[in-house]
Image (spheres, helix red, strand yellow):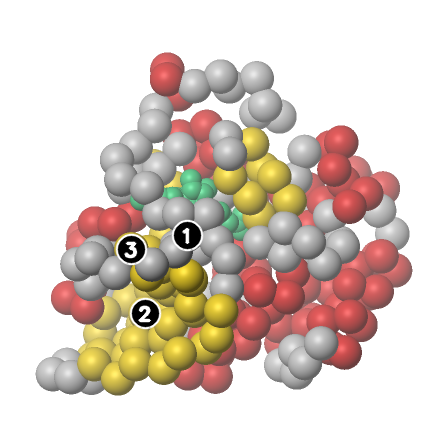
Amino acid sequence: MLPHVSPEVGMISPRTRARMVARLRKDGIADERVLAVMAELPRHLFVAEALSSRAYEPISLPIGFGQTISQPWVVARMLEVLLREVAPQRVLEIGTGSGYHAALLAMLGMEVFSIERIEALQRRAAATLGKLGLRPHLRHGDGALGWPERAPFDAIVFTAAVPCALPPLFAQLRPGGILLMPMEEDGQQRLCLRRWDGARIQEQDLGPCHFVPLLAGTVSLSQEDTTWIR
Ligand code: SAH
């Protein structure tokens, strides 16, 4: 259950969310825990107000700064895989973006650490999550480096496409932990699951996907147009 739900949440009826969840179910999402948190979390609070009415459609949407919030099915699928594979308690997310995915992870009872390279997005996500009473650990930084001070994690989830050459973050996983990441090679992206057993890596291909790219370095507030922060 969400600790706080602000009055503006009422603007879009829970029935709209219920329709989104019915579509997810029809499209193969079966984990009731995932469906329940997606039925509860007001996704429209994570996109610009002008797009609120489209927030529950099966599409990805812009969140400013050239970034996007993934379509509901992709988020649901990643959560379902995560719960099935490792039932994590401590999760590191790379690419906080709007904070939607981080919010769902937190609502599923995980301790969430999330890194975002664009400071304005990171601040806006912190504000949105705070309004809902959710308090994942957020950090402005380059997620390619992970968060070594807070390791080990049960899972590390990338929500931006990782180039094959990126050094893996296995050192920040507990043995048995997983990396869930869109991997990009020759312009093609595949969702990839890698399990680290402390000595060996097992890899599973979960099919094609489409994410914005993981980019190096950080962008601070002074370098951006911050008018979109609400
Ligand atoms: N999980 C997000 C989706 C974000 S889109 C949500 O629920 O809204 C991917 C995000 O990854 C973007 O916000 C982008 O700025 C961020 N990103 C890209 N490269 C990064 C990096 N190296 N470190 C941290 N964040 C990064």
- Circle 2 residue: 179
Q: Residue at x 49, y 17 (%)?
A: 225
Quadrant of the image where one finds ligand 1: top left
Q: Is mark 3 within 8 Å of ligand 1?
A: no
Name the disc covering residue 131, or none: none
Compute the Cα span from label 2 to label 3.
Answer: 14 Å
The secondary element bearing badge 2 is classed as strand
At label 3, the amino acid type is: Pro
The secondary element bearing badge 3 is classed as strand
Q: Nearer the viewer, residue 101 or 54?
A: 54
The image quadrant that residue 224 belongs to is top left
Lateral position of residue 4 relative to residue 26, left or right: left
Q: How far from the left and from the top, in percent, is residue 102?
A: 49, 54
Rendered-image quadrant of the C terminus: top right
Q: Is mark 1 within 8 Å of ligand 1?
A: yes
Count of marks placed on residues: 3
Residue contact at pointers 2 and 3, CB within 8 angstroms: no
- Closer to the eye: label 1 or 3: 3
Compute the Cα span from label 1 to label 3.
Answer: 10 Å
